[in-house]
Structure formats: structure tokens, C-alpha cells
Amino acid sequence: MEKEIFKEIVGKLLELKLVEIRREIPPTTINDLYNYLMNVVLINNQIRDVNDASFLIMNIKVNRIYEYLNLKDVTDKSSDTLEHDLKYILEG
């Protein structure tokens, strides 16, 4: 199977999963889902064909995405803690 067709199929699978996830977590984007797939799911797994891709993508759980987004949000904010703390103190 050509790479372009495979990429298109994986993109459609991600969009389909995003519809399901957005029912629970509305602000989720396709980039969030893609990052979760690359940074968490594919660490121990590998996609060889469309069956592997569909199995891994469709088995992504909403609560795992929620935990991943919370962790990402916390780690992003912790890098500039001093600035965040000063804003919090000044804003009351």
C-alpha cells in the first residue's frame, strides 16, 4: 500500500476517534490526539498495516487522553513557574 494512501487512512481513523473523544472532552484537537498516539501509544507498539493502525487508534480510551492532556498542561506550566506564580500573586 502506498504511503500516501496509508497516511490518509490513518488521518481518517484519527478524525473518527476525535469525534468520540470530543463528546467527553470538547476542546481536544487532532494534534492532541496525534501527539498522544506518537508519545504514548507508539512507544511500545508499532504500526505495520491498516489493521494495526485501526486497532491502536480505536482502542484509545477517553480517560487516558484526559490524563495525558492534564499532564501535558501541568508540565507546560511548570516550566515557567516563577512567571505563573507572580501573575497569580498580582492578580489576587
Image: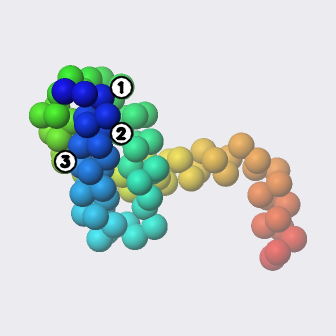
Q: Is residue 40 left or right of residue 74?
A: left
Q: CA distance from mark 1 to mark 3?
A: 17 Å
Q: Which residue is mark 1?
A: 43
Residue found farthest to the bottom: 92
Distance of label 2 from label 1 (alpha carbons): 9 Å
Residue 92: quarter of image: bottom right
* Quarter of image, res 8: top left
Question: Is disc 3 surrounded by few (<14), some (14 to 19) or many (20+) residues within 10 Å?
Answer: some
Picture coordinates of residue 15, whole percent (x, y): 30, 56
| Tag in front: 1 or 3 | 3
Is 73 or 50 nearer to us in this picture?
A: 50
To which residue does mark 3 refer?
A: 58
Q: Secondary structure at mark 3?
A: helix
Q: Identify the residue position indicated by label 2 in the image.
A: 37
Quarter of the rendering containing residue 56: top left
Q: Amino acid at mark 1?
A: Ile
Give the quarter of the figure containing the N terminus: top left
Identify the amino acid type marked 3: Met
Q: Residue furthest left?
A: 51
Residue 42 visible: yes
Secondary structure found at label 1: helix
